[in-house]
Image: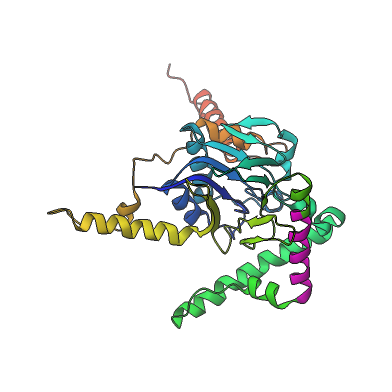
Amino acid sequence: MKLEYRTVWISDTHLGSKGARAKELSRFLKQVRCDKLYLVGDIIDCWRLKSRWYWPAEHNDVIRRILKHASRGTEVIYTPGNHDDAARQFVHMAFGGVDIKPHTTHETEDGKKLFVTHGDQYDLVVQHSKLLAVLGSVAYETLLKINRYYNIVRRWFGMPYASLSQAIKLKVKRACTFISKFEEILAQEANKRGMDGVVCGHIHKAESREMDNGVQYLNCGDWVESCTALVEHMDGRLQIIDGIKAVEELKAARLAIRAVQAGAAMPEDDDLLEGEEDPIDLIPADRALFGAFRPIFPGPSDIRSSKHSDLKHAKASAKANEPREG
């Protein structure tokens, strides 16, 4: 049993930053089966990796799961954003079965045409003040750190998760005006292109609504706080889903099925989400995807091969210096 959709869109995963919810995303991707998977920008956070290398095993697992989807026949399309703009020099190329495009279009099962783009090209701050955009990113990451401790205290008192950044966005008039303007500009662009809707990311605010010009505005959200995805059901229906909740509901469904099987031993919680043997080692295609970013920073495979080469050289030197008998 899997989470089966015709199409899945995810954006703003920010792998390479400490705020990325990589473990949750990896679990979601493992349980999904779809014909098309769109990566709608800011998948890898090059801005953070250029200033500080951070790449734990969980982040590598996400890349591996994406590549596994591609290797099993899922069409994977990657439209880079501003945080992973290093990949834009490789548009119209493919790495590990992942097609990189500046933007693209998608037609749903019921005939709706959607314009798919990260959205930073329509953000006036990003386009006209890169420094201000970078400072905003640093401030946002700092707020995420504060948010983690804030929610630890909330859990002590049995209170649910709360997002400080989302609360601030909704209360600050300028932020609300910016979001509204961003949505309007994208809806206008989709309308110019003769599209029925637009799918984007960038502002970390999941949304699905019809704009004044009749265009359907769809924002995937993010995998830093909200952990949301946009999905297309087999009949063409579009829906924003909570990725963590979807996995938990799948787990509950599997538990219910096993509970009615006579004499079946109850599995451990983690086993309820295990559908297959899944080796953790890197597959060769991982190196192909990281190759897109090597001009900016070294990938994990580069670091690993460098360490291996140094070790091999050290062993050879030690052997050469050993005293010979006789």
Query: Where is residue 283 drawn, in percent x and y?
Result: 48, 33
Residue drawn at the location 79% of the way across and 59% of the way down: 133
Is residue 242 placed above or below 310 in the rendered structure?
below
Seen from the viewer's position, the closer of residues 199 and 252 is 199
Name the colour scheme. rainbow
Residue drawn at the location 58% of the way across and 40% of the way down: 300
Could one spot residue 68 in this view of the protein?
Answer: yes
Seen from the viewer's position, the closer of residues 120 and 326 is 120
Q: Based on the picture, tell me whether residue 180 belongs to the magenta stretch.
A: yes
Is residue 102 placed above or below 225 in the rendered structure?
above
Q: Is residue 11 left or right of residue 174?
A: left
Q: Is residue 127 left or right of residue 105?
A: right
Q: Is residue 206 left or right of residue 127?
A: left
Residue drawn at the location 63% of the way across and 54% of the way down: 12
Q: Based on the picture, tell me whether residue 57 belongs to the magenta stretch.
A: no
Q: Main secondary structure of the magenta part?
A: helix
Is residue 213 placed above or below 39 in the rendered structure?
below
Residue 128 lies in quadrant: bottom right
Residue drawn at the location 78% of the way across and 70% of the way down: 177
Query: Where is residue 119 drawn, in percent x and y?
Result: 73, 52
Residue 129 lies in quadrant: bottom right
Query: Where is residue 77 drawn, in percent x and y?
Result: 61, 39
Query: Where is residue 35 drawn, in percent x and y?
Result: 50, 39
What range is drawn magenta here? 173-187
Seen from the viewer's position, the closer of residues 143 and 217 is 217
Q: Residue furthest left?
A: 263
Could one spot residue 310 in this view of the protein?
Answer: no
**Figure disc tally:** 0
Q: Is residue 96 left or right of residue 168?
A: left
Q: Residue furthest top?
A: 326
Quadrant of the frame with the C terminus: top left
